[in-house]
Image (spheres, helix red, strand yellow):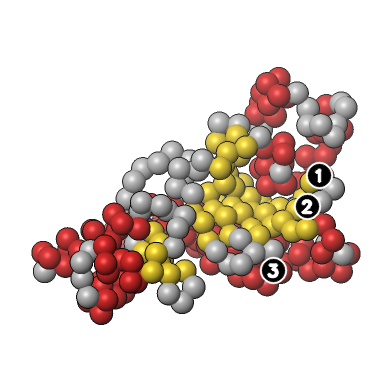
Amino acid sequence: MIKVLHKALDILEFVSYDKNRTYSLTEIAQEIDEKPTTCANIIKTLLDREYVERVGKRGYKLGIMAFSIVNISGYDIELVNKAKNPLKELSESINSSAVLSVLKNNRKHVLLRIESNSIIKVNPAAMDISDPYETSTGLVLLAYQPDSIIDDLIEQNGLPLNFTNEEDYRNFLSSIRKEGYLSMTVKKEVAEVATPVKSNGNVIAAIGVYMPKYKFTPEFQKKVIESIIKTSTEISDSLENKYENKLEKTTKRL
């Protein structure tokens, strides 16, 4: 039993060398000096517990639960857990890449990225950090921030490039809140749509999809907007249900 535990830890250490790479069963078995059949059985348990994630039919990478046991600033494991499958389904349904982003210290952090080929990339250190002015998810997140945050950003960074005065910018953020989404074009080549994710009435994240502009016909745009709003609602509802279940269990104990 102890030997199996050591082998499982060896597997986790091996696939963590490069968190973005996919490892085959043969590679893993060779690394831990074990028969492929035995290695497959150990991996099955790690898959069931989500410490390893399957990529395609024969690939493996570090799973989401491996990240949950380390406390890394800017990374919300429960949020990623709730968003991963709905966001993957959204990406597949419209054949476009998708992201889950949060705002930390006035910077946008991408926690989860799903490529249009359904490859999921979890970013545990939230190192995919950028100016919130530059993307649809960043602007959606800003739309729900208090005035003090908006004031700080304007003082630090000025206004976004497309705005010449503060009133127009604040009206723009207000329109995002009213519509519940943002559709925009970046650098005349990429189309983006983003919506907020809520928990207990508060916006805690934003999801976004992006694609080549030539795909973004009026008909497809309508489908994308309807799909992403549905997905953000699904994620928000799952977060609400999680909170309600925890509250119910706590009440029963009392």
Give SS at disc 2.
strand
- Counting from the top left corner in percent of width and height, residue 150 is at 70, 29
Amino acid type at mark 2: Val
- Counting from the top left corner in percent of width and height, residue 48 is at 34, 71
Q: Nearer the viewer, residue 184 or 19?
A: 19
**Within-10-Å neighbours for mark 3: few <14, some 14–19, many 20+:** some
Which picture quadrant has residue 97? bottom right
- CA gap between label 2 and label 1 equals 7 Å
Point out the tag, 2 or 3, that comes first from the N-terminus: 3
- CA gap between label 3 and label 1 equals 21 Å
Amino acid type at mark 1: Lys
Residue at horizontal 66 percent and vertical 35 percent from the top: 131
Amino acid type at mark 3: Asn
Mark 1 lies on residue: 187
Q: Is residue 78 visible?
A: no
- Given contact means CB atoms under 8 Å apart, are the residues at marks 2 and 3 in contact? no
Residue at horizontal 88 percent and vertical 64 percent from the top: 218
Which label number is shown at residue 190?
2
- Given contact means CB atoms under 8 Å apart, are the residues at marks 2 and 1 in contact? yes
Q: Nearer the viewer, residue 227 or 216?
A: 216
Give the residue furthest to the bottom: 37
Point out the tag, 3 or 1, that comes first from the N-terminus: 3
